[in-house]
Image (spheres, coloured by chain):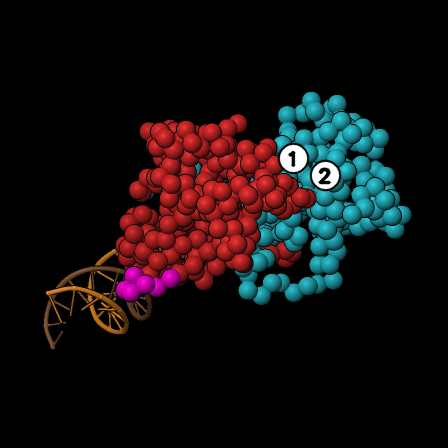
Chain colours: A cyan, B red, C orange, D brown
DNA sequence: TTAATGCTTCGACTACGGTCGAACTATGAA
DNA sequence: TTCATAGTTCGACCGTAGTCGAAGCATTAA
């Protein structure tokens, strides 16, 4: 009767509306405080605090204390991946997919998924560096080629320090809107933050949308044309 | 506050222990009756019926009536994928990963994931046909090459009828035990059933384990050596 | 020190949902 | 027809978990 890991425990954690809202908000990649998450979920501070300690105990979040603030963020890529997969199901199976609001188009075009670029532009990036031979798929894992090393360095990404870290360098992640892979892992993270540094993109406050500047998009398309 | 699809709804569906047990049981790929699922979950027939209609309404299951029996199976590959992902999280995050029983080793070696081969042998299959050039990764999708077509036909798989079907031919699926990809989609399904027809493998009754015959494993390793 | 802010803990209320017994329907067998 | 098996529906019970008010800590600012 009992076989395999205990799915129900974590599914139940995600299954509460308030907690689900918090997790969705955290998928922006930003760390948020208890109060921010409370308003995000539409509950009072007390209940939010209770929910967050449960999510923490369940291993879904990573808390960090900073002064009198307590910041929460998604615990790991694994968690983010499960959430994206769930979104995919919910978007597809949910008979009437949510109304396409003004922001919706922007979200489909480009958004952050935990901490890397997702949406149309995310898959464009992934497909392009794969096609250019900067990245190869070896069985299950993604591997950066020699040209990929050069390319990333030229873009101003410090690969050496990334490779020291314990998290995977390259990793696939599946979109719920595009249903295609985009680049996750520490390199995916590095790309996005580099784009921000270069002023190519800015993150929309209060949503997961990523907004390209006109010049930024031109440069992006030059480098990662389809 | 409300952004993206409604995660909570389906997560809550999976979050109930009884329902989670049923879904885990269905991950064997076999369609099961209401009574079987009831005993699987350790509840009475009535409650099982109630649970199953909820899962059905949520789009997670596909019901089929046959005489006075009602069979349920996992609705789609998407659902199976989410469940596998959840198992991965639960196995990793669950502080004390479940005791490694006698069946556990067998499960890690080879098991069915919804309807295709997973576990160590599953990733071996995937890696090998990729290395042999039968399969290529094009951006996000997997594509069978010309040599792959020949190879599958030689194995006695009717590709033409598979390609007529509306489900994807090739698809990646992530293991919770191996944390690596294996082959899903209708071709993955076809491979497994072909292995069964050839007598290379048999499915363990009442669990997800797949057992190789001595001769079967020899042939399998010949074709899909690492 | 006092005051203000951010968060946690306690306690009590409430409601939703899982559970089963019992009665009911449907299919198949004798 | 009658009986048996498979599944559904109804109704009632109960427990758990989400919710918030109020009080309690903890950290910073004045």
Q: CA distance from mark 1 to mark 2?
A: 8 Å
Residue that badge 2 annotates: A130
Q: Give the label on residue A14, or none.
A: none
Left/right placement of residue B14 relative to residue A141 reads: left
Per the image, label 1 sits on a secondary structure element best described as: strand
Image coordinates of residue B86 in percent, x first then y, are 50, 42
Q: Residue at x 81, y 32 (%)?
A: A151
- Residue name at image x 56 percent, y 45 percent: B149
Pointer 2 chain: A
The label shown at residue A137 is: 1
Q: Is residue D3 above or below residue B113?
A: below
Query: Which numbered disc flags the more N-terminal residue, 1 or 2?
Result: 2
Q: Position of residue B92 (x, y in %)?
A: 50, 33
The x and y percentages for residue A225 are 81, 46
The reply, left or right, for residue C14 in relation to residue A130 is: left
CB under 8 Å between discs 1 and 2: yes
């Amino acid at each position: 009767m009992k076989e395999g890991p205990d799915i129900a425990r974590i599914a139940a954690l995600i299954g509460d509306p308030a907690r689900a809202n918090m997790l969705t908000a955290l998928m922006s990649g930003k760390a948020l405080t208890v109060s921010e998450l409370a308003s995000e979920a539409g509950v009072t501070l007390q209940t939010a605090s209770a929910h967050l300690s449960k999510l923490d105990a369940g291993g879904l979040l990573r808390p960090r204390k900073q002064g009198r603030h307590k910041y929460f963020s998604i615990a790991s890529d694994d968690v983010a991946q499960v959430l994206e997969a769930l979104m995919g199901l919910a978007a597809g199976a949910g008979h009437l997919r949510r109304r396409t609001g003004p922001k919706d188009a922007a979200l489909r075009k480009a958004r952050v998924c935990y901490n890397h670029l997702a949406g149309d532009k995310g898959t464009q990036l992934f497909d392009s560096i794969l096609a250019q031979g900067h990245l190869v798929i070896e069985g299950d894992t993604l591997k950066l080629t020699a040209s990929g090393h050069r390319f990333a360095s030229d873009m101003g990404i410090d690969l050496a320090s990334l490779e020291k870290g314990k998290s995977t360098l390259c990793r696939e992640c599946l979109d719920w809107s595009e249903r295609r892979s985009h680049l996750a892992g520490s390199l995916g993270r590095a790309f996005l933050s580099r784009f921000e540094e270069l002023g190519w993109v800015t993150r929309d406050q209060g949503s997961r949308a990523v907004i390209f500047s006109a010049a930024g998009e031109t440069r992006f398309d030059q480098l990662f044309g389809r």
